[in-house]
């Protein structure tokens, strides 16, 4: 049986794979495992993105939390990084976010933070999963006054905005900024934070109705933002994903500035300011080769991890790094928050623009992006880790690696959150690498169905 937890919590189609029953069980087991050492009545903070299934799953989860004697604090629609921050600020025992991030509306997910605002270790997730599979064996369910209760807070998002603008108090007067909120959790927080700092904000896709999250908008669909930035003659565009833990940018010419470029811009500025610890950025194997060449030229050290912001974070904590992230726009500023934070990323990027007086296109030229093709192969979830067990796939990968050796690279990996195997090729010719990536993805998909 496949592991319940992926790289970013438990994901699935809401009401089909991720059912209210599973949410309740996760609430029970999660609350029990994360608070069993406490001597007080524990409290767990719960927030969600704008998906229509959020209320259903949040209430089921909180019922589970209360059934094992813990209290829940429901903060409603709020970015994932806000829950991580507020879990620490309010000194509650754990935090939970109901979100499927950049995925379509039919999906949802449940991810936990411990009392320090960090995502859980594999060991803790396995303990929660084992408890569910053993039908909560050994857990005592209280009655009477021992049952937990739910408290509702409406001020949490303001607390998060205050934290962000105090962490990066950049003066945005005179700057025109187009913001794509992805019809998601940033629809209020990002717009208000930028306005508080004096920015002239043009917000798009900031009218969530529960069904339109990530629908042809946000950091996974940036064409409209690119066109709007040019039309409005804005200095910058900012695109968030559904739960606002990632952010990608658009320069004044309408070009996308991805997570690698954002880390390059901010990392070099921090290095010059003396605030980049160990002159090191932590990145993943998916980062563009151009990012590594930039680091060599600028005297930066890049620590490499496998894909997933949790692994970036683990390495950052191990070596005491202050900046890390992914090409997809998850960027972590560890001295300000314990997870990827789209709003902090945006404010830091804008701060570099203001303090250097340079346009975003000029700043982004610090690294040359090597042509890259990424094609997904749809495969059954239970098979996605086994692609190398198929001889024809293994042979095709070996031949591709030999073909691109010395002038590019081939990276194949199963998605941590979706039923897909991702094929990524870097090389000198965009047309060639796209053809080869599609050919291999088709082979994987057709062979593994």
Image (cartoon, helix red, strand yellow):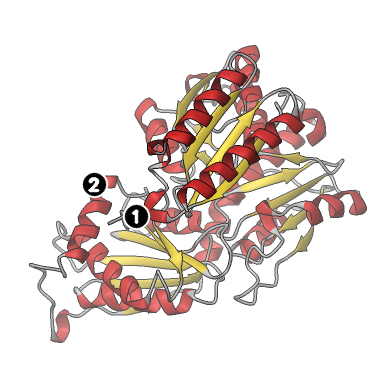
Q: Quadrant of residue 275?
A: top right
Q: Is residue 132 above or below residue 276?
A: below
Asked if residue 183 lies left or right of residue 149, the reply is right
Whether residue 285 is visible: no
Q: From the top left corner, tell me how far across and down residue 328 is, in percent.
A: 60, 43
Within 10 Å of disc 2 (Cα), the crowding (few <14, some 14-19, many 20+) is few
Residue 418 seen by the camera:
yes
Q: Residue at x 56, y 60 (%)?
A: 103
Looking at the image, which is closer to me, 445 or 249? 445
Q: Is residue 144 above or below residue 162?
A: below
Residue 107 position, x and y percent, is: 51, 66
SS at badge 2: helix
Residue furthest bottom in the image: 144
Quick one: SS at disc 1?
A: loop
Horizontally, residue 304 falls left or right of residue 158, namely left
The residue lying at 55 percent from left, 48 percent from top is 377
Numbered circle sitting on residue 253:
none
Whether residue 353 sits left or right of residue 17 in the image: it is right
Residue 331 drawn above or below residue 9? above
Q: Between marks 1 and 2, how big is the CA–CA gap?
A: 11 Å
Q: Position of residue 314 (x, y in %)?
A: 37, 36
114 w.r.t. 106: above or below:
above
| Residue highlighted by disc 2 | 123
Q: Earlier in the sequence, mark 1 or mark 2?
A: 1
- Residue at (21% x, 65% y) in the render: 132
Furthest-left residue in view? 138
């Amino acid at each position: 049986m496949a592991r319940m937890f992926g790289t970013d919590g438990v994901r699935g189609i809401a009401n089909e794979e991720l059912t209210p029953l599973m949410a309740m069980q996760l609430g029970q087991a999660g609350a029990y495992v994360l608070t069993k050492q406490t001597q007080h009545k524990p409290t767990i903070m719960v927030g969600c993105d704008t998906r229509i299934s959020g209320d259903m799953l949040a209430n089921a989860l909180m019922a589970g939390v209360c059934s094992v004697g813990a209290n829940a604090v429901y903060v409603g629609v709020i970015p994932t990084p806000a829950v991580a921050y507020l879990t620490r600020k309010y000194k509650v025992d754990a935090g939970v976010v109901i979100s499927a991030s950049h995925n379509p509306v039919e999906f949802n997910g449940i991810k936990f933070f411990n009392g320090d605002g960090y995502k859980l270790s594999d060991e803790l997730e396995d303990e929660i999963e084992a408890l569910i599979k053993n039908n909560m064996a050994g857990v005592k369910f209280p009655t009477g006054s021992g049952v937990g209760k739910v408290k509702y807070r409406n001020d949490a998002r303001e607390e998060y905005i205050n934290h962000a603008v105090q962490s990066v108090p950049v003066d945005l007067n005179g700057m025109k900024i187009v913001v794509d909120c992805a019809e998601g959790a940033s629809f209020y927080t990002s717009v208000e934070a930028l306005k508080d700092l004096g920015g002239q904000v043009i917000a798009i896709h900031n009218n969530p109705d529960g069904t339109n999250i990530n629908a042809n908008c946000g950091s996974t669909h940036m064409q409209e933002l690119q066109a709007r930035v040019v039309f409005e003659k804005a200095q910058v565009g900012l695109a968030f994903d559904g739960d606002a833990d990632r952010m990608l940018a658009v320069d004044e010419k309408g070009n996308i500035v991805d997570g690698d470029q954002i880390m390059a811009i901010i990392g070099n500025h921090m290095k010059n300011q003396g605030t980049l610890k160990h002159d090191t950025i932590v990145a993943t194997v998916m980062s563009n080769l151009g990012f590594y060449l930039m680091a060599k030229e600028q005297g930066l050290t890049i620590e490499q991890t496998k894909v997933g912001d949790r692994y970036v974070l683990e390495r950052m904590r191990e070596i005491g790094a202050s900046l890390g992230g992914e090409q997809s726009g998850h960027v972590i500023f560890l001295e300000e928050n314990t997870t990827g934070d789209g709003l902090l990323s945006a404010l830091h990027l804008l701060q570099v623009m203001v303090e250097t007086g340079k346009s975003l296109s000029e700043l982004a030229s610090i690294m040359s992006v090597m042509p890259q093709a990424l094609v997904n192969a749809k495969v059954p979830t239970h098979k996605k880790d086994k692609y190398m067990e198929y001889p024809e796939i293994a042979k095709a990968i070996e031949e591709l690696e030999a073909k691109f050796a010395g002038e590019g690279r081939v990276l194949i990996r199963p998605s941590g959150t979706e039923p897909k195997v991702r094929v990524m090729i870097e090389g000198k010719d965009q047309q060639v690498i796209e053809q080869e990536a599609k050919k291999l993805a088709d082979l994987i998909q057709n062979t593994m169905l």
